[in-house]
Image: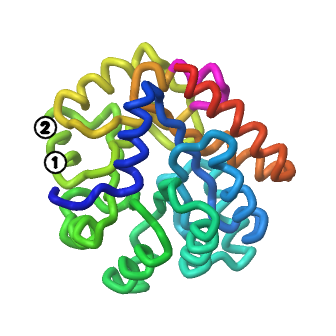
């Protein structure tokens, strides 16, 4: 790679040194509105979140489950845009210069803005990495390689269907960490099983030195602990977004996040 250490690399190095697993939390930018989502985001590190995945709402989120789709709709109805999402990151950075932020979404809003302009603006705002679910490795020259050149990690999803032939392609230009999607299908559906996930994580680790973080179907502290126990950490998204969607207060959402983080960190 030859790129400088990012906040993501630093965070995983620190956790490794402490013998701790990573807890990654996903929230949708602008859900239910800009102010509330920024408040939740600003409270995540103190609730024990090591890496923040910030969803960029998109009109046609075909890879997302119903919970995240509804969150995206609420955000779009509230006027959330890619620019406002970058503004959120910049506002967050005024109070926190250490917690890594990964933008997760689709290629269209980035393409519409212009890749070069987007990468300059994202770096300036304080974004550390990108997960773009609808850009396969075959399209690396579109965004992945320019992003790495701009100092941003490009993080890919691997799934149970990523076979031995496909895996090297998926890992080829990945950096930061690998996001292993433990359940086939859409997000937030079935529950993840540690017994099935462990061997898969081991298989991916044979091909990469990157941390492997497992997401999908984790919605209790106990599940966070068991899944983090067979990987380098875990991601929770839908369960947190559900709390926000149910109209819980920021304090209630963060208290819930803290229980999940404590579960992952006890692994």
For residue 253, side relative to residue 50 (left or right) = right
Q: Residue at the spot x=49%, y=19% of the render? A: 193
Q: Based on the displayed image, in which of its 4 quarters is residue 31 positioned?
A: bottom right
Residue 172 lies, in percent from the top left, at: 16, 50
For residue 146, side relative to residue 53 (left or right) = left
In the image, 95 versus 191, the foreground residue is 95
Single out the mark in the foreground, 2 or 1: 1
Q: Based on the displayed image, in which of its 4 quarters is residue 110 positioned?
A: bottom left
Q: Quarter of the image for the N terminus: give it.
A: bottom left
Residue 123 lies, in percent from the top left, at: 41, 74
Q: Which residue is mark 1?
A: 169
Depicted 221 relative to depicted 178: above or below: above
Q: Secondary structure at mark 2?
A: loop
Q: Which residues are magenta?
A: 218-226
Residue 242 lies, in percent from the top left, at: 73, 45
Residue 33 lies, in percent from the top left, at: 76, 69
Magenta stretch: residue 64 in it?
A: no
Tally of numbered tags = 2
Q: Residue at the spot x=59%, y=77% of the render? A: 87
Work out whether residue 181 can be spotted.
no
Q: Which mark is residue 154?
A: none
Q: Residues within 10 Å of mark 1 (few under 14, many from 20)?
A: some
Q: Are marks 2 and 1 in contact (CB under 8 Å)?
A: yes
Work out whether residue 61 can be spotted.
yes
């Amino acid at each position: 790679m030859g790129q400088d250490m990012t906040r993501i690399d630093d965070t995983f190095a620190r956790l490794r040194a402490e013998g701790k697993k990573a807890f990654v939390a996903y929230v949708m930018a602008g859900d239910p509105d800009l102010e509330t989502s920024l408040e939740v985001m600003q409270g995540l590190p103190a609730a024990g979140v090591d890496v923040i995945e910030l969803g960029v709402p998109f009109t046609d989120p075909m890879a997302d489950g119903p919970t995240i789709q509804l969150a995206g709709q609420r955000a779009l109805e509230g006027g959330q845009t890619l620019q406002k999402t970058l503004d959120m990151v910049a506002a967050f950075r005024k109070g926190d210069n250490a917690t890594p932020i990964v933008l997760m979404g689709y290629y269209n809003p980035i393409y519409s803005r212009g890749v070069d302009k987007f990468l300059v603006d994202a770096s300036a705002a304080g974004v550390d990495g990108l997960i773009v679910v609808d850009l396969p490795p075959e399209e690396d020259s579109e965004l992945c390689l320019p992003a790495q050149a701009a100092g941003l990690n490009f993080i890919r999803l691997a799934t149970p269907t990523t076979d031995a032939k496909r895996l090297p392609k998926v890992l080829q230009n990945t950096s930061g960490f690998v996001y292993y999607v433990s359940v086939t299908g859409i997000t937030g559906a079935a529950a993840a099983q540690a017994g099935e996930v462990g061997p898969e994580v081991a298989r991916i680790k044979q091909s990469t030195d990157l941390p492997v973080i497992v997401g999908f179907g984790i919605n209790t502290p106990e599940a966070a602990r068991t899944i983090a126990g067979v990987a380098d950490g875990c991601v929770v998204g839908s369960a947190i977004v559900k709390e926000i969607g149910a109209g819980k207060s920021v304090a209630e959402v963060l208290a819930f996040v803290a229980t999940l983080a404590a579960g992952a960190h006890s692994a």
